[in-house]
Image (cartoon, grey):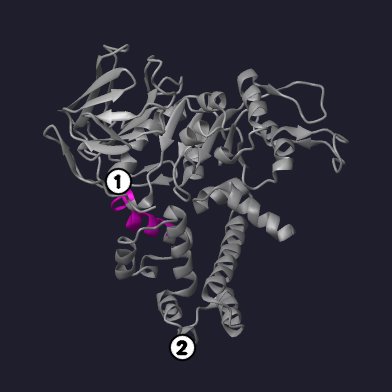
Amino acid sequence: MAPRPFAEEEDDGKTVQQARHGDPLPDDIAFLVSVVDGPDRGTSYRLGPEAPKALVGTSPGADFKLGDRLVSRRHASFELAGSRLRIRDEGSTNGTVVNGVAVVEALLVGGEQVRIGSNVLALQMARVAAQPLPVSTSFQRVLGASREMQRLYPLLERVAASQIPVILEGETGTGKEAVAEAIHEAGPRAKGPFVVFDCTAVPASMVEAELFGHERGSFTGADARRIGLLEQAEGGTLLIDEIGDMDLALQPKLLRAIERREFRRIGGNKALQADVRILSATRRNLDAEVEAGRFRDDLFHRLAVARIELPPLRKRRGDVPLLARAFCRELGGTEASLSAALVARWDTQEWPGNVRELRNAVARTLALGETFLDAASDGDAEEAAAPTGSVAEVAARVIGEGMPLARARQHVIDAFEAAYLAGMLAQHGGIVTRAAAAAGVARRHFQRRRARTRD
């Protein structure tokens, strides 16, 4: 979604300044938000590089909790935006007022007064001693030398060392599964299994059976006992991918399993222990999902002991060349496979598909070559230099069939990926864990490929 501009308006000499969502976050800016009048007088909250966002309200899940009865559960939110502070009303009952003007969203510079319910909040901006960022360009398999990523590494190290539930938030393709697996591999459960449950990949009627398992004869088609993913993750980590898409009817069952650390298979009478660490990932705004009644408040609080938001690739300044070269090596390319001009052009793109889209672009380039891709984009694929090997045969076939570019491109990518994954498995004796580590991808890529082969 494109950044939304903010209109400039003045009130009592205070200016709500224009800015954009992509503004860099300084390391030496902090805001102190203090309740100076009202039922919660004396309460305060500090926003800085270590805590750049805060939800304000009466909900137990709010970062800045207020007790005033005129304050909504999720009333408003603050977020650092460059050297300013963005305030957003989250659909509150009584509204959010800045310097006497009701606002939906505004950017503040410090010195403003904000009314939330019966409380008057004062904002004070301060310069703080900048904390040195780590010099590392990676956390386990997660790559990134940008300031946005380097700020995450200390937090990732802390949550990895613990066993607390974590919600990973971010746009599609930002690498949430890779971060979850990195947390697992850096933590005390690294020797245990890492299991992924994708809420969008299973029909709603089968989600409970997939997650908890079932006994033979428990429903039509249950011809044998099935061990669920929660049980498969025993002693390790279960990543619930796209948790925001989980059916509302199943959420209380998951909550009970997490709170009691036990569950039952469908049709079973025996309670089974669940010694599993739960990580969750979502592309959705779970605060909004809870407010809309599509996600249970109590489950959200249980899962969101820690929340980590992964930045989109367009905000990770300088990471595109680093990632492109890394993907090129993983996919069997060389330094000469990607020209400096191509990488420079990629570095200026928006990448709506984020890291996943960039990886696909590298795979296409290795499979087809820059010359072929440029020609195909101009409609001159027949005159382009043909790639070599089995991928070239696929390319020749789809061109001969007159297939549209988008479909043809995907066929060639699929052929290249199949050959690459098969080769990596062969090099590592068919052991998926080793092949995935060497390829720098999640094990699920190999599992999906095997499933397609069986089909």
Q: Amino acid at mark 2?
A: Glu
Q: Amino acid at mark 1?
A: His
Q: Give the SS element for disc 1.
A: loop
From the image, give the main secondary structure of the stretch colored magenta.
helix
| Mark 1, residue position | 21
Residue drawn where x is 85% and y is 40% of the image = 222
The percent position of residue 54, horizontal first and vertical second, equals: 35, 28
Q: Is residue 173 above or below residue 390?
A: above
Query: What stretch of residues is rendered in magenta?
Result: 315-327
In the image, residue 390 lies in the stretch drawn in magenta:
no
Residue drawn where x is 18% and y is 34% of the image = 109
**Distance from Cα at disc 2 to Cα at disc 1:** 43 Å
The percent position of residue 451, horizontal first and vertical second, equals: 70, 54
Query: In the rendering, which numbered label is found on residue 383?
Result: 2
The percent position of residue 167, horizontal first and vertical second, equals: 49, 33
Q: Quadrant of residue 221?
A: top right
Residue drawn where x is 43% and y is 61% of the image = 328
Residue drawn where x is 27% and y is 12% of the image = 41
Instruction: Report whether residue 146 is seen.
Output: yes
Q: Is residue 299 above or below residue 433?
A: above
In the displayed structure image, the side of residue 401 where residue 310 appears, left or right: left
Q: Give the SS element for disc 2.
A: helix
**Residue closer to the observer: 66 or 337:** 66
In the image, residue 326 lies in the stretch drawn in magenta:
yes
Q: Quadrant of residue 89?
A: top left
The percent position of residue 272, horizontal first and vertical second, equals: 73, 23
Q: Are marks 2 and 1 in contact (CB under 8 Å)?
A: no
Q: Is residue 259 above or below residue 282?
A: above
The mark nearer the N terminus, 2 or 1, is: 1
